[in-house]
Amino acid sequence: TIYSYEEVIPTLLKKLSPGIEDYPCVIPNWDNTPRSGSRGLVLNGSTPELFRKHLREGISLAKNLPEKSRFLFIKSWNEWAEGNHLEPDVKYGHEYLKVLKYELMNC
């Protein structure tokens, strides 16, 4: 199953419910077809700028949490076989990391 990363961004973060301990989680990319074959899931078309958009939404949700609970998780296992990494790569170099640093320094 292939989804456009840009199109699924709005569905990846859910509104946090009062009284329920929950934390936002952002994901830079995903493709587990090397492991799952035709049953795999691909988020196609991730870019540093689209990740920035997703990250900003996650940061915004985290800001609304009580101060002691302001956590934001980044689902990135640096799992190259599943296209789930937040490390420098050939295509974008350090751009995902630069986006992460900028957004965290300016939130």
Image (spheres, helix red, strand yellow):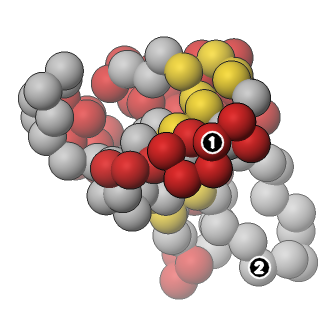
Number of the label disc, if any, that sits on residue 10:
none
| Residue 31 visible to the viewer | yes
* Position of 74 relative to 104 (above/below): below
Residue 89 percent coordinates (x, y)? 16, 34
Where is residue 63 drawn, in percent x and y?
A: 55, 56
Residue 98, quarter of picture: top left
Instruction: Please determine whether, in this image, residue 58 is positioned above or below residue 69.
Output: above
Q: Quadrant of residue 3?
A: top right
Residue 79 appears at what percent x and percent y?
36, 57
Disc 1 + disc 2, Cβ < 8 Å: no
| Amino acid type at mark 1 | Gly
The amino acid at mark 2 is: Glu
Secondary structure beneath dot 2 equals loop
Q: Which residue is mark 1?
A: 37
* Residue at (65, 67) in percent of width and height: 23
* Quadrant of the rendering where the C terminus is positioned: top left
Q: Secondary structure at mark 1?
A: helix
- Does 68 appear above or below 72? below
Q: Residue drawn 32% across and 50% down?
A: 80
The residue nearer to you, when weighing 90 against 19, is 90
Mark 1 or 2: the one toward you: 1
| Image coords of residue 31 (percent x, y) | 52, 39
Looking at the image, is mark 1 or mark 2 earlier in the sequence? 2
- To which residue does mark 2 refer? 21
Residue sitting at the far bottom: 68
